[in-house]
Image (cartoon, rainbow, N blue to C red):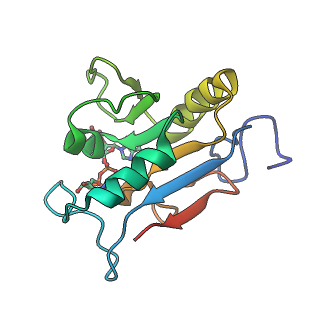
Amino acid sequence: MSQQNDTSNQNGAFDSLVPVAMIVAMAKNRVIGVDGKLPWYLPEDLKFFKRMTQAKPLVMGRKTYASIGKPLPNRLNVVVTRNAEFSHEGVRVCHDLPAALELADQHATIEAAEEIMVMGAEKFTARHYPLPSGCTLRKWK
Ligand SMILES: NC(=O)c1ccc[n+]([C@@H]2O[C@H](COP(=O)([O-])OP(=O)(O)OC[C@H]3O[C@@H](n4cnc5c(N)ncnc54)[C@H](OP(=O)(O)O)[C@@H]3O)[C@@H](O)[C@H]2O)c1
């Protein structure tokens, strides 16, 4: 965790109290999605995803949320969008990743969740956006 101040690291991203993990299913060629959808249907992977994210706050980009189409049950769903008008029942909306992580962190702290899960779409990888220090990329495929 950063020593810079209470809430941000040197990248200006939010430093959470609760660990942040990124979960991503990736083909050998690093593809994670095609035409706004998952390019495969693997029930075992979906079960694994459910197990890994159950009861943990889940942060995702608006397009990832659109690909799912509804909030995933039994966990806080946080959708990040620049669209000030966006709202969907059952999801919390934030307009940048630090705000999303701050909300997820508060929720995880209250609910004693062991970690915050960032659903790894391209826009949220470390290459494109400063993720908190200590964030891990978990390859699951
Ligand atoms: N294989 C996997 O593990 C996995 C996981 C997740 C998603 N996917 C796939 O990935 C694809 C979607 O991913 P994607 O990378 O295209 O989109 P995405 O990251 O899910 O969503 C992109 C949207 O998020 C919002 N956003 C991104 N960065 C932002 C920022 N810094 N501040 C505020 N809002 C921000 C914007 O929404 P607005 O346009 O509304 O402003 C942007 O258009 C789909 O095909 C999905 O199936 C795969």
Residue closest to the eye, 3 or 69: 69
Say which residue appears at 54% left-offset and 36% top-offset: 56
Q: Residue furthest right?
A: 3
Give residue 37's position: percent from left, percent from top.
Answer: 18, 55
Numbered marks: total = 0
Q: In the rendered view, does 65 fall on the left or right side of 59?
A: left
Q: In the rendered view, does 66 fall on the left or right side of 57?
A: left
Residue 73: tell me if it is visible. yes
Say which residue appears at 69% left-offset and 55% top-offset: 133
Residue closest to the eye, 122 or 21: 21
Q: Residue furthest bottom?
A: 29
138 versus 47 height, above or below: below
Q: In the rendered view, does 41 fall on the left or right side of 15?
A: left
Say which residue appears at 22% left-offset and 59% top-offset: 38
Give residue 21's position: percent from left, percent from top.
Answer: 58, 52
**Rendered-image quadrant of the C terminus:** bottom left
Residue 129: tell me if it is visible. no
Q: Residue furthest left?
A: 35
Give residue 25's position: percent from left, percent from top.
Answer: 37, 64
Quadrant hosting residue 86 = top left
Give residue 16's position: percent from left, percent from top.
Answer: 69, 39
